[in-house]
Image (spheres, rainbow, N blue to C red):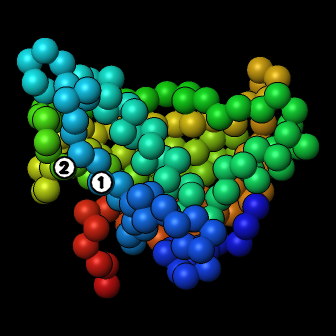
């Protein structure tokens, strides 16, 4: 696993010229902008409910990328520690508040709430500007050969660092500077 990079530093950009597509780190978490395309909508023209899960999954993956967790390296390290490993969604609690429509630009906010032995709990919000559309709490578990296993130390340290930057009330950030 790599050391935690300075987001969008010249060295990181040289290694991944498309890193800017991964959103941005904000105090306490991560924000990923997503445009709603025709393929994301149902026959009524609103975002199909399952597509919010895809948006949230992308945001979780890109959050890891920007805090320095190189998923390919993590997989190699985890295979040595825990053969047959996987990250699985253990639980999800979602509240659908308002619909999104084609051409909307959404922001998926992700903030770590808890880093436990074998799981990470994150709060995610789908926003359109300042308007809350979907809010969720997601618990992701690390398993190997069908059993929960301790999260690899490198990932634990990166997530703990991100969690320590999170607002004390556990709310996902709005991207505004804290101070």
Q: How many labels, in total?
A: 2
- Residue 168 vertical position relative to residue 9 in the rendered view, above or below: above
Percent position of residue 17, x then y: 52, 66
Residue 68, located in which quarter of the rendered image? bottom right
Mark 1 is surrounded, within 10 Å at the Cα level, by few (under 14), some (14 to 19) or many (20 or more) other residues, namely some
- Residue 179 vertical position relative to residue 72 in the rendered view, above or below: below
Percent position of residue 99, x then y: 13, 32
- Residue 134 vertical position relative to residue 42 in the rendered view, above or below: below
Mark 2 is surrounded, within 10 Å at the Cα level, by few (under 14), some (14 to 19) or many (20 or more) other residues, namely some
Percent position of residue 5, x then y: 61, 74
The residue positioned 13% from the left and 56% from the top of the image is: 129
Say whether residue 11 is left or right of residue 105.
Answer: right
Q: Are marks 2 and 1 in contact (CB under 8 Å)?
A: yes
Comes first in the chain, label 2 or label 1: 1
Frontmost residue, 102 versus 151: 102
Secondary structure of residue under mark 2: strand
Frontmost residue, 116 versus 48: 48
Say whether residue 91 is left or right of residue 70.
Answer: left
Q: CA distance from mark 2 to mark 1?
A: 7 Å
The residue positioned 31% from the left and 33% from the top of the image is: 52
Position of the N terminus by quadrant: bottom right
Residue 47 can be seen, yes or no: no
Secondary structure of residue under mark 1: strand
Name the disc covering residue 105, or none.
2
Residue sitting at the far right: 80
Percent position of residue 59, x then y: 43, 48
Say whether residue 87 is left or right of residue 179.
Answer: right
Residue 58 can be seen, yes or no: yes
Residue sitting at the far left: 44
Query: On the image, numbered disc 1 is attached to which residue?
Result: 33
The residue positioned 89% from the left and 43% from the top of the image is: 81
């Amino acid at each position: 696993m790599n050391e935690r990079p300075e987001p969008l530093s010249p060295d990181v950009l040289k290694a991944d010229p498309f890193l800017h597509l991964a959103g941005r780190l904000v105090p306490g978490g991560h924000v990923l902008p997503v445009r709603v395309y025709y393929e994301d909508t149902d026959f009524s023209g609103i975002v199909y409910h399952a597509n919010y899960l895809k948006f949230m999954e992308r945001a979780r993956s890109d959050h890891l990328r920007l805090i320095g967790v190189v998923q390919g390296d993590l997989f190699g390290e985890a295979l040595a520690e825990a053969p047959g490993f996987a990250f699985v969604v253990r639980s999800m609690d979602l509240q659908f508040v308002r619909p999104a429509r084609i051409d909307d630009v959404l922001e998926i906010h992700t903030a770590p709430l808890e880093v436990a032995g074998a799981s990470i709990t994150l709060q995610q919000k789908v926003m359109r500007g300042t308007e809350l559309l979907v809010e969720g709490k997601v618990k992701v578990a690390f398993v190997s050969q069908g059993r929960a296993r301790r999260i690899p130390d490198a990932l634990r340290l990166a997530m703990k660092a991100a969690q320590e930057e999170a607002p004390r009330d556990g709310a996902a950030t709005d991207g505004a500077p804290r101070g």
